[in-house]
Amino acid sequence: MMKTLTLAILFLIIVSGSNLSAQETRHSDKHNYAERYGNTLNLGLGVGGYSGYYGYVGHSLPVFNINYEFGVAKNFTLAPFATIYSYHDNYYRETVIPIGGKGTYYFDQALGASSDWDFYLAGSLGFAMVSTTWDNGYYRDNNYHSVNPLFLDLHLGAEYHLSRKVGLFLDLSTGVSTIGLAFH
């Protein structure tokens, strides 16, 4: 996964060497609306856990992610985000809530994509609040499971606009991949 993500990043950096301006208005033949980045609520669901973030990941329950993008520059948005997920093994259950900011760069124009599609590369930085509950009767070693509160995640994603107001996205990341709805 990391090798594929690295190759995708290199490709996008090479392609992005041209003069880009995704904030400029483009019209879709299918939907016939102007595309602008930002002012978007993204709600995503995923499965898994941040296995690189923890020493061990047991059975993870669905992951929920929410963020709201603000357009800050051509092709670039910033979004405060919150994610919540829980996982467990035979001895404990852990609930993790990463909170932070996500910076997203859009490559639609460089890829020649219609305004029906958005393609992006992003990075998330924040901190994680963690709550661990140990099973009754289990003698725990406090050094067995320690969590670094720094949260860092890289994303590669795409969104298909179902209409002017709603899109369907897939966000692949170094942590949890999510699929969800975007409300513009």
Image (tube, rainbow, N blue to C red):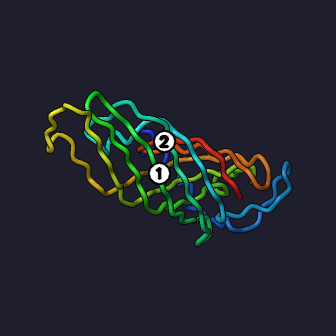
Question: What amino acid is at disc 2?
Answer: Val
Task: State the separation of the CA atoms marked 1 and 2.
Answer: 7 Å
Q: Position of residue 31 (x, y in %)?
A: 84, 51
**Left or right of 145 in this view: 163:** right
Name the residue carrying label 2: 63
Q: Secondary structure under badge 1?
A: strand
Name the residue carrying label 1: 83
Q: Position of residue 180 (x, y in %)?
A: 62, 44
Return the disc, 1 or 2, that comes first in the chain's sequence.
2
Q: Secondary structure under badge 2?
A: strand
Residue 100, picture quadrant: bottom left
Q: Could you tell me which quadrant the N terminus lies in?
A: top left
Q: Return the residue nearer the eye: 181 or 61.
A: 61
Q: Residue at x 57, y 53 (%)?
A: 120
Q: Are marks 1 and 2 in contact (CB under 8 Å)?
A: yes
Image disc number at residue 171:
none
Q: Answer whether residue 10 is visible to the viewer in this image.
A: no
Q: Answer whether residue 89 is visible to the viewer in this image.
A: yes
Question: What amino acid is at disc 1?
Answer: Thr
